[in-house]
Amino acid sequence: MASERPADTAGCRRALEALIGLTRPDLAQDLSDRLIARFGSFGEVISARIEDRAPVFDRLPEIEQTLQSVQLALNHILSDQFARRPVLSSDQAVLDYLRCHMAYEPVERFRELFLNAANELLADEVMGVGTVSAVQTYPREILKRCLELGATALLLAHNHPSGNPAPSKADLDLTHRIANAARWFDVVVHDHLIVARHGWTSFRKAGYL
């Protein structure tokens, strides 16, 4: 099942104006307009690579530092909320955490959340980094890591830089391979979540798992 979150462009622009205004109020409106035109939303601006923001912030390091500080603070807040509860794919804190870390990445990353019997987080690891349209990961490496950690459950996640969270055939095939391999070790794959700029998809809710 996919869910979409259309960007509130006016709200994104106001948020950026407020941040930029902390150091350069004279440039806040112009730079926020340029950032929204370039990236599309507040989330994409904050999550963008420094080199991608550089043409807008030419010789304005204080603004870049402000945005990096905001990103660090958001990551800390979401990680703290995420670590304090059982990890369930339907939990909004989990979705927010994954979207913050992955939805705006320029290349695909395959992430595994390793869980214990109480669905508490043992480890959160990126086990595959690919291209703008594909990522390769290996079930045997995932299961090897499960055994090392003593994990009894997995929550899989990866991002789609295209912005479309719909799974590909390769996504479906890989998920089934991982789930089938996990059964031999009594490890449960709770879900596979695809996160993107324009929404997310749960394999479990969509009936793929």
Image (spheres, helix red, strand yellow):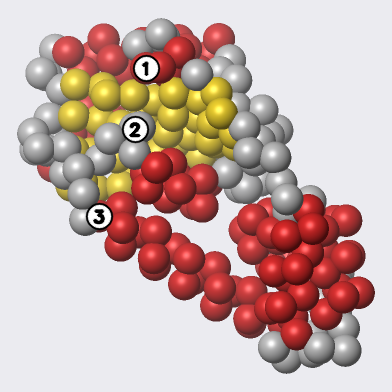
112 lies left or right of 120: right
Three-letter residue code for mark 2: Ser
Contact between labelled residues 1 and 2, with CB atoms less than 8 Å apart: yes
Q: Residue 171 at x, y = what percent?
A: 50, 18
The spot of residue 67 in percent (x, y) is 64, 74
Q: Circle 2 sits on which residue?
A: 89
* Rendered location of residue 65, percent (x, y): 63, 82
| Residue underneath mark 3 | 83
Q: CA distance from mark 1 to mark 3?
A: 22 Å
Q: Is residue 166 above or below residue 18?
A: above
Q: Please rate how many residues cluster around mark 1, counting C-alpha atoms within 10 Å: few if below 14, some from 14 to 19, many from 20.
A: some
Q: Which residue is mark 1?
A: 204
The residue nearer to you, when weighing 163 against 126, is: 163
Assign a secondary structure to mark 2.
loop
Q: Secondary structure at mark 1?
A: helix
Determine the secondary structure under disc 3.
helix
Q: Is residue 53 above or below residue 108?
A: below
Q: Residue at x 48, y 66 (%)?
A: 74
Q: Residues within 10 Å of mark 3 (few under 14, many from 20)?
A: some
Compare marks 2 and 1 and give the one earlier in the sequence.
2
Give the quadrant of residue 107.
top right
- Say whether residue 27 is left or right of residue 153: right
Residue appearing at x 27%, y 24% in the figure: 190
- Sequence-wise, the earlier of marks 1 and 3 is 3
* Circle 3: residue type: Ala
Which amino acid, mark 1? Arg
Query: Would residue 147 be visible to someone looking at this image?
Result: no
Label total for image: 3
Q: Label 3, label 2: how many angstroms apart (C-alpha)?
A: 14 Å
